[in-house]
Each structure stands twice: as structure tokens, then as C-alpha cells.
Image: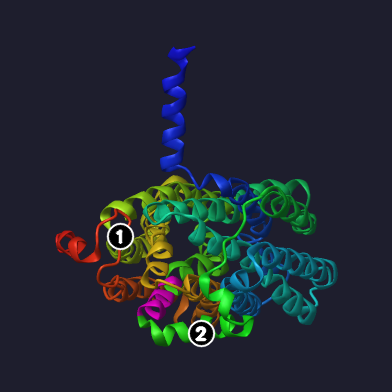
């Protein structure tokens, strides 16, 4: 009996050190399944609409309005989570998602009624940020500082794993077996399953901020905007967060059509896209730990900004270099997906810039995440007609390099503890070795 005890303790110790916060395990699983439902159409909806006769500019506008809704909802998610609690905010997201899906799929898509499609897809866009990013605020309050980087790494692991990996692989099967419209209808089932795990089975109690006790809910909402004046570095972090996933939401609008010119089918594109983010979710975890050791700012700057700038160009030009070689094009995409995970520590860095009002800081970060959903398709819609695919991808790569420059100025306040437990003043000496 005693001989079996040490391995058990060792395994528990390893899980406590490397795993997500135990009290939020059901929530992480719920995010994974919910985002799988949300991501069923991400890789194929644009080319599907274009094949049915919609102009690429109209498709880009549809995704742009969807992104506007996500941006607004992302900002509200942080302050609403503090004001009303994450569970109520997450439930609100589930309801909006289901209503938007019913209107979009049931009344807009069958006859391509663009007005209904535009309105209901926008309503649908309010759903997932209220659900997912409210849970991210929950994580920032319930995770110890020395594990915050890995805790948010686990969040982006399940978020991206559901949205871009399981969603892509599931839809590559479902559109053949169920058809396009039924695949979209099935998303409601997965969203409800995810909500059950994250809201019902998750019994953890959210600890509200100190400010909530003395501030009104309206003041909490206002704080989500005024914090950028009080803490300009939070604003810079928000800009970097926009750039982080702009290409992620721009690529599905024009890359499938671009690759089709080199002989790639929609199914092959979905497999490439899904594999890219299979690698990405693994490195979301790895870069969470790398950020805790190498430094949050250093990781975002070098791996995220510089790395993504280079690999964005490499991925785009891979079919030019290698032709229709499926595996080599996929490999170049994987490199981009791996380095995209270099931005994970930003979710630990930005809340650590403030002692209080972490929900407000996260609101700005969440707003940046939402604006990326808007900015990606908007860039395609504005520039694809005038400068073509090559010009668009150069803009995306340039934004990544810009984010590296901006990240240089996001420094922690003096005497703030880093993830490793040492002060920022002492950590500065180590930082100089890398910057």
C-alpha cells in the first residue's frame, strides 16, 4: 500500500503545478465545448457564401459587423462579470448566441436575405465574448500570481482548441454528412453542452473586487473606459491584443479563395486550418510557462510580434514557393500558429499593471480581442480590391512588427512582483539580457 503512495502524490503535485486551477476545471471544459460550437463555420462560411453568389466585399462586411458586435461584447464582458458575476454574464451570452443562430440560419441563409443575415449574425456575435471572456476575468481573480501565466495559457488552450481545432475538424466532417445548414444548427447543441459544464457543474464562487462593494454598477462600466487614461500602458496592451489575432480573423475571408488558385480544396483548407491551431493550442500552454520564466513582455515581443510578422509572410508565400504541396504549406502555417501563442502572456501582463480594477484592465484586453474579429475582415474588405491579397498580407505582417515595438513600452510598475516572485526592479537586470 505504502509503495503506491509516492507516485500518487507526485502526480497530484505535478497537476497542481502545471494544470489549470482545480476549482475551475469544469469551466475550462465548458469553454472548450462552447467554442467548438461557435467555431463550426469559421473556416468555410465565407467561401460558401461566395460560391452561392455573394461578393467577397459583402462577405467581408458581414464578418466585419459580426466583429463590431464581438468588440462591444468583449468590453462589456469584463465589467459585467465584476458587476453582476460571471455566471449571469455567461448565461446572457448563451441566450444571445442561440437567438442569433436561429435568425441567421433559419431566416437569413436559406434565401440569402442579406439584411436579416447582417442583423442576426451581428446579434450572434454578442454571444461568445460574454460567455468566454467573463470566465477569463474569473480566472484572473481566482489564480495565484505565480501561476497566472499558466492559468491564462490553459484558457487560451481550450478557447482556441474549441474555436479553431475541434470546430474546424468537426465541420470538415459535418458539412459532408449533415450539410451546411444542419452543421450550423448543430452548433446550438454544442453551445448548450458547454454552458452546462461551465455554468451548472462549475461550483466555484467568484470573489468580487474590493471596488465592487463601494462603486455602483455604472461606475464599474465607466471604469472600463477611464482606466486607459489612468493607466496608458493598459491602452497599449489593448492595441497589441487587437493585432494579436487580426490575421487569424482575416485569413479565413480570403486565404481559402487564394489557396484554391493553387489547387487546394475547401476540405484541405479546413484540415490545414485545424492543424495550425492544433499546434497553436499546445504552444498556448507552453508559452504560458515560457512567459512565467522568460518574462511576459519578452515572450510577447520576440515570439509573438517578431515571430508572427515573419511567419505570416512565410505562410502566405508558401504555395508560391512549394506549389500545391499540402504538407509544406501546412508546415509553414503551423509555424505561424505556434508563434501566435507567443501572445498568451499578454493576458497575465496587462492585469498585473494595476493593483485594483483588474476587471477593468481585462475589459480593455477583451475589447482588443473583439476588435481583432472586426479588424481582420475590415482590412480585407477595404484593401483586397485595390492592393490584392499580397498587399493585405503585407499589412498584416507589418502590424505584427508594430506590436513588437509597442510591447517594448509595456513595463510593470516598480516593486510589482513578477510571476517568479521577484520584484520588477530586480527582474530588470535579467530582462536586459534579452532586450
Q: Which residues are magenta?
A: 233-241
Give coordinates of residue 405: x percent, y percent. Answer: 28, 75
Sequence-first disc among 2 and 1 = 2
Per the image, the residue denoted by label 2 is 225
- The residue under the point 62% across, 73% down is 83
| Structural crowding at the residue carrying mark 1, measured as other residues with C-alpha within 10 Å and reported as few (<14), some (14–19) or many (≥20) | many
Question: What scheme was used to colour the molecule?
Answer: rainbow
**In the rendered image of this protein, does residue 169 appear above or below residue 253?**
above
Per the image, the residue denoted by label 1 is 418
**In the rendered image of this protein, does residue 300 appear above or below residue 197?**
below
- The residue under the point 62% across, 85% down is 218
Toward the viewer: 44 or 348? 348
- The residue under the point 61% across, 48% down is 166
Q: Quadrant of the C terminus?
A: bottom left
Give coordinates of residue 288: x percent, y percent. Answer: 39, 53
Is residue 325 found left or right of 44 in the rendered image?
Answer: left
In this view, the mark in front (2 or 1): 1
Give coordinates of residue 99: x percent, y percent. Answer: 80, 69
Q: Quadrant of residue 160?
A: bottom right
| Structural crowding at the residue carrying mark 2, measured as other residues with C-alpha within 10 Å and reported as few (<14), some (14–19) or many (≥20) | some
Amino acid at each position: 500500500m505504502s509503495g503506491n503512495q509516492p507516485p500518487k502524490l507526485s502526480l497530484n503535485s505535478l497537476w497542481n503545478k502545471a494544470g489549470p486551477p482545480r476549482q475551475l476545471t469544469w469551466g475550462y471544459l465548458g469553454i472548450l465545448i462552447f467554442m467548438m460550437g461557435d467555431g463550426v463555420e469559421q473556416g468555410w462560411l465565407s467561401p460558401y457564401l461566395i460560391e452561392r453568389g455573394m461578393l467577397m466585399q459583402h462577405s467581408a462586411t458581414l464578418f466585419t459587423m459580426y466583429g463590431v458586435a464581438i468588440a462591444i461584447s468583449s468590453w462589456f464582458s469584463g465589467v459585467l462579470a465584476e458587476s453582476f458575476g460571471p455566471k449571469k454574464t455567461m448565461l446572457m451570452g448563451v441566450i444571445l448566441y442561440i437567438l442569433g443562430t436561429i435568425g441567421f440560419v433559419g431566416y437569413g441563409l436559406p434565401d440569402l436575405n442579406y439584411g436579416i443575415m447582417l442583423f442576426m449574425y451581428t446579434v450572434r456575435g454578442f454571444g461568445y465574448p460574454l460567455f468566454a471572456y467573463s470566465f477569463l476575468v474569473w480566472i484572473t481573480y481566482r489564480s495565484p500570481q505565480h501561476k497566472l501565466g499558466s492559468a491564462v495559457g490553459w484558457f487560451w488552450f481550450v478557447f482556441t482548441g474549441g474555436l479553431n481545432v475541434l470546430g474546424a475538424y468537426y465541420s470538415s466532417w459535418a458539412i459532408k454528412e449533415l450539410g451546411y445548414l444542419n452543421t450550423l444548427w448543430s452548433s446550438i447543441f454544442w453551445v448548450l453542452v458547454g454552458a452546462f459544464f461551465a455554468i451548472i457543474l462549475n461550483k466555484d464562487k467568484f470573489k468580487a473586487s474590493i471596488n465592487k462593494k463601494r462603486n455602483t454598477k455604472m461606475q464599474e462600466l465607466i471604469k472600463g473606459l477611464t482606466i486607459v487614461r489612468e493607466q496608458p500602458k493598459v491602452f497599449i496592451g489593448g492595441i497589441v491584443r487587437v493585432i494579436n489575432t487580426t490575421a487569424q480573423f482575416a485569413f479565413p475571408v480570403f486565404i481559402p479563395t487564394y489557396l484554391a488558385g493553387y489547387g487546394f480544396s475547401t476540405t484541405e483548407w479546413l484540415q490545414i486550418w485545424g492543424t495550425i491551431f492544433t499546434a497553436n493550442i499546445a504552444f498556448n500552454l507552453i508559452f504560458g510557462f515560457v512567459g512565467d520564466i522568460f518574462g511576459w513582455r519578452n515572450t510577447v515581443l520576440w515570439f509573438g510580434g517578431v515571430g508572427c510578422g515573419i511567419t505570416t509572410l512565410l505562410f502566405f508565400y508558401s504555395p508560391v514557393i512549394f506549389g500545391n504541396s499540402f504538407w509544406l504549406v501546412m508546415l509553414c502555417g503551423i509555424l505561424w500558429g505556434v508563434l501566435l501563442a507567443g501572445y498568451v502572456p499578454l493576458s497575465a501582463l496587462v492585469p498585473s499593471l494595476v493593483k485594483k480594477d483588474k476587471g477593468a484592465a481585462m475589459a480593455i484586453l477583451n475589447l482588443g480581442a473583439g476588435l481583432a474579429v472586426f479588424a481582420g475582415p475590415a482590412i480585407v474588405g477595404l484593401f483586397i480590391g485595390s492592393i490584392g491579397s499580397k498587399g493585405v498580407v503585407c499589412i498584416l505582417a507589418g502590424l505584427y512588427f508594430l506590436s513588437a515595438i509597442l510591447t517594448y513600452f509595456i513595463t510593470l510598475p516598480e516593486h510589482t512582483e513578477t510571476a517568479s516572485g521577484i520584484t520588477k526592479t530586480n527582474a530588470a537586470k535579467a530582462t536586459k539580457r534579452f532586450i
